[in-house]
Image (cartoon, helix red, strand yellow):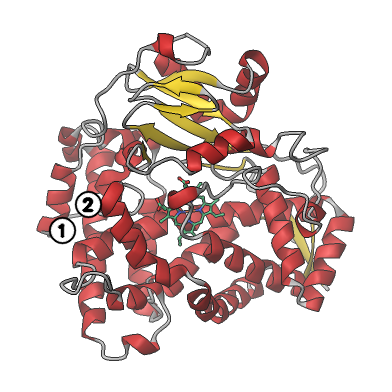
Amino acid sequence: MTIDIDPRTEARFTKMQPFGSGSTQRPDPAMLPDGPRFNGLLQSIMLMRFRHQWIPRLRRKYGDVFSIKILPEGRWMVFFHKPEHVREIFAGDPEVFHAGKGNAILGPVMGEHSLLLVDSSQHKRARKLLMPAFNGHALRGYESMIEGITKTEVGTWKPGVAFESLERMNALTLEVILQVVFGVTDEERLSELRPLVNRTVNVSPAVFLGWGFPKLQQFGPWRRAFENQAALDQVLYRMIAERRRETDLDQRSDVLSRLLLVRDDEDPADTGLTDEELRDQLVTLLLAGHETTATALAWTLHELGKDPAQEAKARDAATRGDNDYLEAVLKESMRLHPVIPMVVRHLMEPATIGGIDLPAGANVAASIILAHESEDAHPDHLAFRPERFTEGHVETNTWIPFGGGVRRCIGAGFSLMEGVAVLREVLSVYDVALPPGTREEAKVRNITSVPKNGAKIVVTRR
Ligand code: HEM
C-alpha cells in the first residue's frame, strides 16, 4: 500500500520513544520487599503470559507485599492488594504517583496527548475536558444508540448454533465506539473505518515492542502497522475537520461532538482541544474501551450460560427491567474474571505504603487479581454470586476492576451502562447456555485477560 503520510503522523512516530521516556532512577533492590530474584526477562514473561497463576503463587510464597523484577533491566514492581494499601496507592499525590510513564509503549499509536499517557497538570487538563462526555447526563444520551446497535447485532444470531460470544461482543463494542464515541453513522465512512480500526486494535506484541526501535518501521509488519496508522489518522483528521464545520454540534450526543464544544472554564484563553489532542483521545478511547468491555461481556455470558439458575434470575431481571441486578451480574463477572490484572504507578519520589518505605523509581502495583480473590473480602471467592453487589457486602477498595483515584477509568460508567444495555437486550430475546463440554480459562491477549476459547454460547429464543 502506498499512501500519503500526514506530517503529524510522521512527527508522532519520530517523537514518541517508548523506551526513552520515564524516570531513569533505578531503585536499590535491597530497599524493596522480598520476591523472586531470577532474570528480569523471564519474570516479565511470567507476568505477561502466566499472571493468573504466577501472581497468586508469589503471594502464597512471599506474603501480602512482594517485588518482581521487570524489563527494561533494573526496573522493579512492588505488588499490593490489601484494601488499606490499595487506598494509599489510589490516594497518592499525583505528582509523586505517576501513571502515564508505564503506558509509554502505547505512545506511537495513542499519541503524546493521550489521557493514558500524560501526568500532572497535563493529565488534570485533559481529564477535566474529557469528563463531561462521560458524566451521568451524557451517558443517558448514549443509551438508546447502544440499544439500537445491540438489537441489530443480536438479530443476526442463529438459535441452536454454538458461536464465540467474545468475537460477537468485540464486533458489537467496536460498533459502539465508532457510532457512539466517534459519532459516525453513515455506512460509507463506517466501512472505511472498520478495517483500519480493527488492524489498530489487533496489533501483535512484536509490533508493539518494535515501536521502541524507530528503524524497524521500514520493514514488514512494522511498516504495515505504521501505514495502517497513517491511513487511520487521515480518516480521523478528515472526520474532525468536517465535524468542526457542523453547526448543530450541541444537538449531537456522540463523544466527539461533545469534545469539540468543551472549554476550560477556569482559563478564558482556552480554545478547546486541538486536532492532534482530539485524534489522540479518540484513539485512546477506542483502544481502552473496546476490547475491555467486550471481554467483560463475554465472561458474563459464559458465567450465565454455565449456571441455569443464575441465568434464570438474570433473565427475570431483564424482563422486569431491573438494571441494578443486571449491573450486579456484570460486576460479579468482572470480579471473578478481572479484565485488566493490575494498575501501576511509578514513584517519582520516595513514598510509604502500608508502613513500607519505598524509593523513588520503584513501580507500585495494586493487583486486581489478588484483590478480587481475597477470601476476607469475597468469601467463597470462586463462586459466581451477583448478590454480593445487591446486598451491599462489597467493601471499598476490594472491587477495583477500573482502578481508582484521579486515574480511575474514565469509561467505567460508560462500560457498565453499555454492558447492562447489552445484557438486557440479549436476555430479553434469548436463553443462553453453554455447548456441552465447554471449559474456559483466562488467556492474555494484548493487555486484557480474555476467555481462552472465546466464551462459546448457544442461544434459543425465549
Ligand atoms: C470493562 C471495561 C473496562 C475496564 C475493565 C477498564 C479498566 C481500566 C483500568 C484498570 C484503567 C486504569 C485505572 C487506573 O490507573 O487507576 C482504565 C483507565 C482508562 N480507561 Fe478504562 N476500562 C474499561 C472500559 C473503558 C471504556 C468503555 C473507556 C472509554 C470509552 C475507557 C477509557 C479509559 C481511559 C481513557 C483511561 C485512562 C484514565 C486516566 O488515566 O485518567 N475504559 N480503564
Quadrant location of residue 155?
bottom right
Q: Which residue is disc 1 drawn over? A: 3
Residue 196 visible, this orientation: no
Kindly identify the amino acid type of the residue bearing the numbered disc 2: Glu
Image x and y of residue 337, in percent: 66, 43
Q: Quadrant of the N terminus?
A: bottom left
Label 1's element? loop
Against 145, residue 224 (above or below) is above
Secondary element type, mark 2 = helix
Q: Which residue is mark 2?
A: 227
User: Residues at badges 1 and 2 in contact (C-beta under 8 Å)?
Assistant: yes
Q: What is the crowding at mark 1: few (fewer than 14 residues within 10 Å), some, or many (at least 20)?
A: few
- Tell me which residue sits at (52%, 63%) in the image: 173
Q: CA distance from mark 1 to mark 2?
A: 7 Å
Q: Position of residue 58 (x, y in %)?
A: 61, 19
Name the outermost residue toward the front. 355
Quadrant where the C terminus lies? bottom right
Q: Is residue 47 left or right of residue 115?
A: right
